[in-house]
Amino acid sequence: MAAGDRRGGRQSEAARGDGPGPMASAADTADPLECQNIPADAARLVGVRRTLQDWASAAGLPPSTVADLVLASYEAMANSAEHGYRNGPGTIDLLATCDEDGVVVTVRDRGEWRSPPADPGHRGRGLILIRSMSRAEVEPGPDGTTVRMRWSRS
Amino acid sequence: MGRPYYHTVTASPIGIDVSVIDGGVILSVAGEVDLLTADRLRAALEAEVDRHALVVVDLTAVGFLSSSGLAALALAHRAAAAAGHVLRLVAGNRVTLRPLQITGLAEEIAVYPTVPEAVADSPAERS
């Protein structure tokens, strides 16, 4: 499959814009959103952010949760783009899934984990946002970093 | 959603309007402040905080504020303070207020709900 292919089934009615709209209650059965091999650069992340926002809205999450999810996920991706691939271009995988309990967004890169500096700077603030706006697990490893963020439905 | 997202290298442009007021300047920012656009905000702020005693940054029309934008604001706040100047923020919406509050920046930089309130407050009360 080509780099950056969006996998994971059909788009929801709401996302296509020809259905009954985001108020339709198919919410907790929303299809996973899977974006693989996203080029880790700032310009690409804007489109991914919008796609994720549409997905989270269509999943029927409250607007405040949608906003938190979009910002925290963006911070995780921006972190990879900005710090994970200092030695050359890399890619990011994003997976968003949703069930009756809530949503999980996983952002994975294959870059190098760098500990945040003592001065919060923007690296530190990104992690603070991620940890404050979600139940987050950050797993740095030799082959990259995985950030898993969860939100409850209510 | 006709084209796959990754073909769209979407610009997330921000607009920055500068208006001079008595004793200072108001920077009205509109759009999305993210990794792509934060440098423009940083540059615009850098130019103003040295020159004006009061710099009010109006974020009312900002629809997205990421940590790179917060860093630009924090940097400008520090530069303003170093020059003996004052930087104030106007943020009335959750989308800007929440990241400012979570990161503690709202405690470092004075945040007002509206521009008139930010302009009216005297520097003495804030510094």
Image (tube, coloured by chain):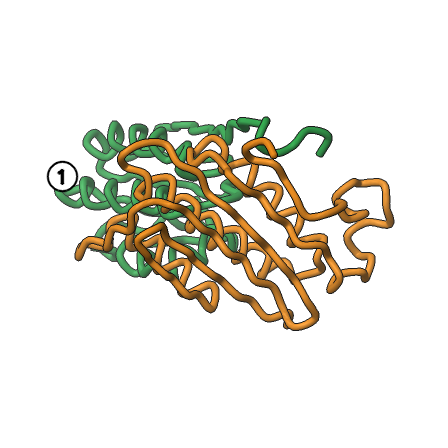
Element under disc 1 = loop
User: Chain drawn orange, letter?
Assistant: A
The percent position of residue A37, horizontal first and vertical second, equals 51, 38
Identify the residue at horizontal 28%, vertical 37% (top origin).
A86
Q: Nearer the viewer, residue A121 or A4?
A: A4
In the image, residue A29 sits, relative to residue A145, either above or below, namely below
Is A65 on the left-hand or right-hand side of A128? right
Q: Quadrant of the N terminus of chain B?
A: top right
Identify the residue at horizontal 44%, vertical 46% (top origin).
A77
Identify the residue at horizontal 51%, vertical 35% (top origin).
B31
Q: Quadrant of the C terminus of chain B?
A: bottom left
In the image, residue A70 sits, relative to residue B20, either above or below, namely below
Total numbered badges shown on the rendered structure? 1
Q: Amino acid at mark 1?
A: Ala
Identify the residue at horizontal 49%, vertical 52% (top origin).
A73
Is A29 on the left-hand or right-hand side of A69? right
**Structural crowding at the residue carrying mark 1, measured as other residues with C-alpha within 10 Å and reported as few (<14), some (14–19) or many (≥20):** some
**Quarter occupied by residue B52:** top left
The percent position of residue A106, horizontal first and vertical second, equals 51, 56
Q: Chain of mark 1?
A: B
The percent position of residue A65, horizontal first and vertical second, equals 58, 61
Q: Nearer the viewer, residue A62 or A140?
A: A140
Camera sees residue B35: yes
Q: Nearer the viewer, residue B43 or B93?
A: B43
In the image, residue A154 sits, relative to residue A32, either above or below, namely below
The percent position of residue A87, horizontal first and vertical second, equals 27, 34
Mark 1 lies on residue? B83
Camera sees residue B116: no
The colour of chain B is: green
